[in-house]
Amino acid sequence: MDTILPLNLVTLARRVVEENAAIGRRIAVAESCTGGLVAAALTEIPGSSDVVEIGFVTYSNEAKMSALGVNEDVLSTFGAVSIATAWAMAQGALHKSEADVAVSITGVAGPGGGSEAKPVGTVVFARAVRGEDPDKVIAQQKLFDDNGRAGVRLQAALCALELLLPEQAD
């Protein structure tokens, strides 16, 4: 396949598209630190239009609030890189779309921007499924090896794609 993206990313994206198409499920992604990388990988796959509903790239706090409805209090209290913000981003992606499942990604890709509490490589994910109790949203924080900005972003994109596999969201 002709692609500029890493093969492992495209291979996993193909699996996400095929498995979600097989069950008629539409997906949304709300990305921050990955800057659209997950959506790019998904749309690299022929037939992805049957599965991909929408992708949001909400890099700034203002974009998280305006595009996804993340509450300013959540951002000021917990920060952009937090379980609360990832949860709100995933919920917002569902509310602002017709998707059946949404995954959000927010983190510190580096090389700067890290802190003692949230070092470079800290990435938070959330997955929400339409019709499920919002309290059942899966949210998790990971610390990826700081092998450079591109490496953190790739690891985060791979993790987000894993969360979009049907067996992960059921």
Image (cartoon, rainbow, N blue to C red):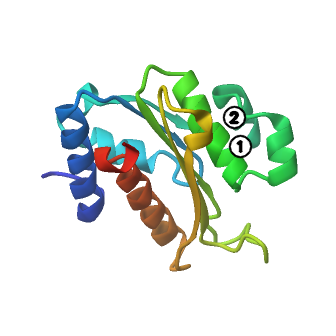
Q: Is residue 144 above or below residue 43?
A: below
Q: Are marks 2 and 1 in contact (CB under 8 Å)?
A: yes
Which amino acid, by three-letter code, is at mark 1? Ser
The residue to which callout 2 is attached is 63
Measured along the vertical axis of the image, is residue 110 above or below residue 77? below
Residue 56 position, x and y percent, is 53, 34
Q: Can residue 67 be spotted in the picture?
A: yes
Q: Residue at x 12, y 52 (%)?
A: 1
Q: Is residue 60 left or right of residue 58?
A: right
x 63%, y 43%: residue: 87
**Amino acid type of the residue tagged 2 in the rendering:** Ala
Quadrant the C terminus occupies: top left
**Residue 51 at x, y percent in the picture:** 29, 30
Query: Residue tagged by mark 1?
Result: 60
Task: Locate residue 67, reporting x and y percent.
Answer: 64, 27
Give how far apart the Cα atoms at labels 2 and 1 are.
5 Å
Q: What is the secondary structure assignment of the residue under circle 1?
A: loop
